[in-house]
Image (spheres, helix red, strand yellow):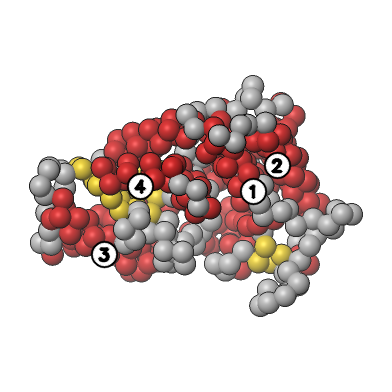
Amino acid sequence: MDEMKTLLTEISLVNSLVELKRLHEKLERQMNEQLKRYDSMEELVYSLSEVHDALVKKTLYFAECETVQSAVGERPKTWCWFVMGSMGRREATIWADQDNGILFDCEQGKEQKCYAYIQQFAAVGTKYLQAVGYPFCPGNVMATNPRWSNSLQDWCTKIYNYLAGHLPNDIRFLLMAVDMRPIYGELRLVEEEKQRMTEWIYQRPIILKRVGEHSLFPKIPLGLFGHFLEERYGPYYGQFNLKHSGYVQLINCVKFLSLLENITADTTLERIEKLKGSIPRSLLEDTKQAFLQCLYFRLKHAAQYGQHDHYIHLQKLNKEEQWKLKKAMKTTKKLQRFVLKKAGGMKDV
């Protein structure tokens, strides 16, 4: 991983967004080579995450400087920019969309001025990240969305409302927030709120049940005879969605099982490790291997084709790769059946 270490050094020395974008593009070329000769997928994904973190932190440093110079509002006494989604779990591919937000704490009576500062920081930060190669989130899960940039008091109110609500999106928003990871600023703000939120969910069986049910969808695209189910309509006709072939279902199942045990962790691998004793050993090991296999296919697709979507023609995978993908999908179906038993046995009250 010497190339990755060199890249980290280069990132620390650059002084412009243009240079950061160039290094992001260099990362794509390096990943193509790394995938041909990697020894450990865990180490490769961790190294990739370190580079992403360095790129984001340097970009946000530039954004912070610009925000301070703009003299908009008043800077809160403490604040933290956090990431969610695949980057929050340290398993992003090369060109991950933005999934981010900001938490802040300020003195009473200064909320309006602090919000003005944070909104400016969010606007500049997301714009700069886009310039460096992190596309805007199509679902608007970004710091510029008031849902994801809040004072601590407003954040707690929103989380409580999701816990008390009965809409499908309430569970979806909670699952997004469970992946939040602090990346720039006062890290403890996010760490403490994440721990608090995990405990709140753990204390509410009805929420856990709904999270478990949520993780059962979408269905794994395998037919009755174990064949791949490709897209039948639309612009991706005849193609296969790598993201929804088992990856999303697997990480959501692991999230549910972790919340069931009041486990707070950043990555899917950490969650799997901490679930020892809570899941049959063979299923736990199969789940880990299935997850690593999903990561391999996602990284290979991103590195080889440079595409931001998750669709691929299965003919581009050789027979061994298709067999490994199918095995990972079957493991995820087993994990879903295990989750169904857990969630099905919980009281709906």
N-terminal of the two: label 2 or label 3? 3
Tell me, yes or no, whether the two marked residues, 4 and 1, touch with CB atoms within 8 Å: no
The residues bearing labels 3 and 4 have C-alpha atoms spaced at a distance of 25 Å
Q: Amino acid at mark 4?
A: Lys
Q: Amino acid at mark 1?
A: Gln
N-terminal of the two: label 4 or label 1? 4
Crowding at dot 4, Cα within 10 Å, few <14 / some 14-19 / many 20+, comes out as: some
Q: Is residue 40 left or right of residue 159?
A: right
* Corner quadrant of residue 19: bottom left
N-terminal of the two: label 3 or label 4? 3
SS class, disc 1: helix
Residue 336, label in figure: 2
x and y, in percent, of residue 83 in the image: 40, 50
Residue 33, label in figure: none
> Which of 270 and 117 lies nearest the eye of the viewer?
117
Q: Amino acid at mark 2?
A: Gln
The residues bearing labels 4 and 2 have C-alpha atoms spaced at a distance of 29 Å
x and y, in percent, of residue 233 in the image: 72, 75
Q: Is residue 134 left or right of residue 66?
A: right
The residues bearing labels 2 and 1 have C-alpha atoms spaced at a distance of 8 Å
Q: Is residue 19 left or right of residue 343?
A: left
SS class, disc 2: helix
Nearest to viewer (mark 4 / mark 2): 4
SS class, disc 3: helix
> Which of 12 and 293 lies nearest the eye of the viewer?
293
Q: Which residue is mark 3?
A: 124
What's the residue at 30%, 53% (across, down)?
Answer: 149
Tell me, yes or no, whether the two marked residues, 2 and 1, touch with CB atoms within 8 Å: yes
Nearest to viewer (mark 1 / mark 3): 1
Q: Which residue is mark 1?
A: 249
Nearest to viewer (mark 3 / mark 4): 4
Q: Amino acid at mark 3?
A: Val
